[in-house]
Image (cartoon, helix red, strand yellow):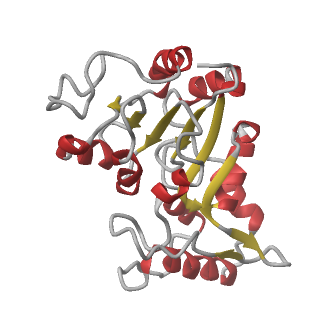
Amino acid sequence: MTTDEKILVVLDFDHTIVDGNTDTWIQNVHKDHGIEFSEQIGWTEYMRRIFVEFEKAGIGREEMATCLREMKLTTGMTKLWEFVRLYKRRLKVIVASDSNSWFIEVLLAHFQIKDLVDEVHTNPASWNQNNTLLKLEGYSDNTTCKKCPVNMCKSEIVDKQGEGTYSCLVYLGDGSNDLCPVLRLNSGDLACPREQYRLSRLLRMKQDEIRCTVVPWSDAGNLVPILHNVIKNGRMRHQGRRGSSPISDDDFMMR
């Protein structure tokens, strides 16, 4: 790999960078908001209605920011971001999340990693003039990908980065909406699903469709030596591709 070639690192946010779901966590500021989720209205509209109830209850920007800052990074994520800072010139880092732009902005700043993230792809959110209502929009109108939610296909986000532009793609995620981009990764790329979360379980069920290397994690710090190997070689290299043979419980974690 030449010195000007970069590795693309894509991270989900909820349950991947932060140890929790920002949309459910924020409801701690007003647990009795009275809004119930249904498939008919969808998640984005559900959160819009909750924010309206927050405004009615007098809960504004500062109260919500204080609540968000009580969230923690996932285990080992601090060590992973230290590695990113050390090798940032070799990496392009993007966040692809079904959270929202304001939540992510608050937390990236709080954890002092905002400068390490090149792009954030998520549902746009902005405050009204009086900072009393957080206005939420959907990221996109997904009408083509049946695997993904109506407001976001993460494969489209990855595709926008340019096929063939990077020597390797590393994807960290946890949820079902991370499956679509992971199944499109190629040999030499790396998928890192969080253990005991839905993405890890789904990948076990779709072994024949996997072409990339899969390295589950429960401590993100354990990914550092693997990512160092990726930077050294310009791609993920080891004997055996996870898409070429069945994955047992023992083999699923790369030794």
Residue appearing at x 69%, y 80% in the figure:
55
How many discs mark residues in the rendered view?
0
Return the residue nearer the eye: 164 or 90. Answer: 164
Answer left or right for 202 relative to 164: left
Answer left or right for 198 relative to 79: left
- Residue 145 lies, with reference to residue 237, above or below; the image says below
- Residue 204 lies, with reference to residue 190, above or below; the image says below
Residue appearing at x 37%, y 47% in the figure:
184
Residue appearing at x 17%, y 31% in the figure:
247
The location of residue 160, given as percent across then percent down, is 58, 55
Return the residue nearer the eye: 227 or 197. Answer: 227
Q: Which residue is at the far right?
A: 129
Residue appearing at x 39%, y 57% in the figure:
177
- Residue 182 lies, with reference to residue 250, above or below; the image says below
Return the residue nearer the eye: 159 or 45. Answer: 159
**Viewport quadrant of the C terminus:** top left
**Viewport quadrant of the N terminus:** top right
- Residue 12 lies, with reference to residue 145, above or below; the image says above
Quadrant hosting residue 54? bottom right
The location of residue 185, given as percent across then percent down, is 39, 41
Quadrant hosting residue 90? top right
The location of residue 59, given as percent across then percent down, is 70, 72
